[in-house]
Image (tube, rainbow, N blue to C red):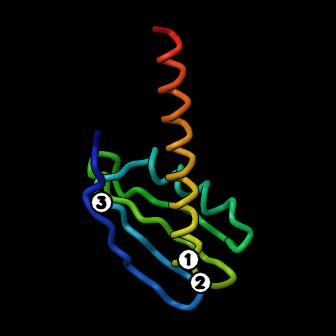
């Protein structure tokens, strides 16, 4: 299992947050962006990867209020969904034995 190298909040002001997830590429950024956009408090979310070989990117979020809470909630929903996927796969594989 791969581990994230780190998280750095590059900006937190009013209704905006800019976050860098070190060592992550398009797959992770797009996934977390979609979870952020699913929150009705989100006005805008996008990410940018500086160069695909460096895996340096940033996630930009603008919300109606508390962008750090919106991001935290999105991460929590993603984690729950991943646990459900893991459980589904585990059960499916056990049934094939």
- The residue under label 2 is 66
Q: Judge whether 91 appears above or below 18 on screen.
A: above
Quarter of the picture holding the C terminus: top left
Across and down, in percent, residue 9 comes to 38, 77
Secondary structure found at label 2: loop
Sequence-wise, which precedes: disc 3 or disc 2? 3
Q: Position of residue 15 (x, y in %)?
A: 60, 85
Q: Residue at x 60, y 66 (%)?
A: 45
Above-or-below relation of 54 to 57 = above
- Verify CB contact (< 8 Å) between mark 1 and mark 2: yes
- Identify the residue position indicated by label 3 in the image: 22
Q: Residue at x 51, y 78 (%)?
A: 68
In this view, the residue in front, 60 or 76, is 76
What residue sits right under mark 1 in the picture?
69
The alpha-carbon separation of the residues under discs 3 and 2 comes to: 23 Å
Tell which of 30 and 3 is nearer to you. 3
Which residue occupies the extreme top position in the image? 97
Task: Please name which of the two marks, 3 or 2, marks the residue nearer to the observer.
Answer: 2
Q: CA distance from mark 1 to mark 3?
A: 20 Å
> Is residue 44 positioned above or below 12 on the image?
above
């Amino acid at each position: 299992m791969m581990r994230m190298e780190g998280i750095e909040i590059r900006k937190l002001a009013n209704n905006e947050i800019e976050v860098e997830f070190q060592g992550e590429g398009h797959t992770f950024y797009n996934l977390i962006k979609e979870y952020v956009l699913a929150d009705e408090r989100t006005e805008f979310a996008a990410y940018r990867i500086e160069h695909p070989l460096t895996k340096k990117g940033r996630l930009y979020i603008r919300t109606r209020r508390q962008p750090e809470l919106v991001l935290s909630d999105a991460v929590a929903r993603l984690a729950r969904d991943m646990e459900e996927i893991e459980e589904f796969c585990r059960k499916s594989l056990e049934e094939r034995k």
